[in-house]
Amino acid sequence: MEPAVHTSGLRRTYTRRRRDTVVALDELTLTIAQNEIHGLLGPNGAGKTTLVKILSTVLLPSAGTARVLGHDVVTATKAVRSLVGLVLGGDRGLYDRLTARRNLLFWGALYRLDGRTARARADALLERVGLADRAGDPVEAFSRGMRQRLHLARGLLHEPRVLFLDEPTSGLDPVAAAAFRRLVLDLRAEGRTFLLATHDMDEAAALCDRVTLIDRGRMLLTGDPARAERFLGDRECVDFAHPDPALIGPLELLPGVTGVERGDGGTWRVHTADRDATRRVLGWLLDRDVLTARHGRPTLEEAYLRAVGDRGMRV
Amino acid sequence: MSLLRVVWHAVRLQVALSRRSPEHALVLLIAPMQTTTMLALTLAAHREDVVANAVLAPGLIGLWVASLDYAGRIVTEDRWAGRFPALIAAPVMFGLVVVGRVATVVLVGTAAFAESWLVAAVGFGRRLTIAAPGTFAIAVAATCLATVGTATLLSAVFVVSRARDVLQNSLGYPFYILGGILVPVAALPDWLHPFSRLVFLSWSADLLRGAVHGDTRGWLRAVLAIVALSAVAMAAGLWLTQRYVDRTRREGTVEFA
């Protein structure tokens, strides 16, 4: 079966100033099967949005090839556009002064839906994303979550077989984000393929069949979320409080300790490579009268940052 | 057919947007004031023979201002509002959306003709009669078509040149002169005539004035000239708009950074 998405040696560079070239995607080769939910993980500036834009024909690649359901995104642009839906996250991208329904009808026309079909689908989608009661309200009165759902409805209007979602739950409250994820799973059950660009590791773990980690445009790995977790390294940590920083030096030298971070108010987090190392740390702390310690697992986000390095706010 | 549907939906989109954006109608405030000024000057000079010019000129200026004012905004506003990526990701030519939206604004601009006529009738007691109403209607229709084509071209030129404000401010008066709106082309220096005839307004102004006075000689040639200039401008506008879309895709400037 033709893969939903296939890229080969895909590269995209931007020229910011004369001779100042930024590599946004670097030799990316990726295959996504039909009916898969594929997570694209990475921090800001990793190249996630660039890939989504290239696959949805909004951006041209500098080199390499990208195909969607067998159609080249550069030479068969029109065919690709009919097959894919693009859902960009955020508050923007809609006609704010128009109603939700009017927005959808306009986009329906751009996808060449006849009037009756566009109206029927707009109403059905508004119902499905929970906006039926607000269909006649101007979008400017919508919350971020409602706009996000309207974005999804717009992306689904022409019944695309492949959907590209870029940070779709960014800024949503947990309830809205959970509802959004349920909707994605329902749509997958209908046979659609998703490429979900996100930096929310837990979201990717909850939704995706496979994930690809990218950083600075380069692929770090592709595999099931468990493999990504293994790649991201230690998933054990010990939190404790102690006022004397002198304690930390010897602690860092214990076998299996991969790092120690200082928190607020004399708190510390010790990262360990495995369960044995965690036991060793707990015993060591107990011997030094540190009687209150908590064993846990860092978030995927923290693990990701440790794996690719914290570059602060630089992109 | 589906292409016309896209244009039609862009028209409806613009109607809906303009209904919720009263500032779009501000252009209609200009025509009554210009009519008042021109008619006052004309009548003060006892030039009853050019009353028609004074009434028709604000209508043409209204059309031009409507297209000039709004044409430059469409693409820029879509980019600022983050709509541009989704618009160009759709499987239709983005230029058609621009055409539909510009057409709506131009149609609103035609109200300037009615405003001028009303100001002349109510304010100055001069009821302008049209000796050749059929020719006049054809002239108005052709002029609207040409304005849509020209506005589509201007829209593309504005975004490609990135000098919208400068161009908007500079393209008013020169076109009123070259277009024979304020004074007939025949009254301009001979060397200006060839340039003037490249501006559809020059044909429109002559045709409209001729229709009012019943002088319809050469009306078909004038209409064909207007339609031809409209087609050239429309084709150039669509081509340039597509070039702009392609450029943003190539350079990665679809959205403002």
Image (cartoon, rainbow, N blue to C red):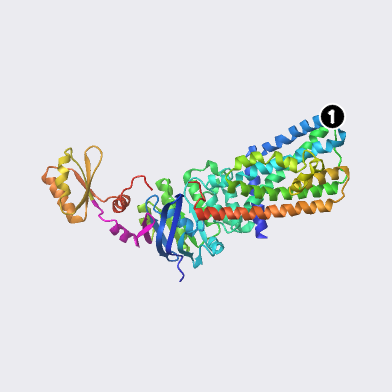
Instruction: Residue lying at the far bottom in this picture: please name it.
Output: A1
Is residue A226 rendered magenta in the image? yes
At 54% from the left and 42% from the top, the residue drawn is A140
The amino acid beneath tag 1 is Ala
Mark 1 surroundings within 10 Å by alpha-carbon count, few (fewer than 14), some (14 through 19), many (20 or more): few
| Rendered view: B56 above or below B139 | above
Give the magenta range.
A209-236
Would residue A140 be found to the left or right of residue A308 on screen?
right
At 41% from the left and 47% from the top, the residue drawn is: A175
Q: Residue at x 42, y 60 (%)?
A: A37
Element type at mark 1? loop
Left or right: where does residue A85 sit relative to residue B53?
left
- Relative to residue A166, is residue B34 drawn left or right? right
Residue B201 highlighted magenta (yes or no)? no
Q: What chain does mark 1 sit on?
A: B
Image coordinates of residue A251 in percent, x first then y, are 16, 47
The picture places residue A131, in percent across and down from the top left corner, at 52, 48
- Residue B239: x, y in percent? 63, 56
Nearest the eye: A212 or B94 = B94
The residue to which callout 1 is attached is B45
Query: Residue B201, percent across and down?
Result: 75, 45
Q: Residue at x 39, y 49 (%)?
A: A44
Which one is in front, B167 or A172? B167
Tell me the quarter of the image containing the N terminus of chain B. bottom right
Residue B130 appears in the rendering = yes
Report if residue B11 is visible in the image: no
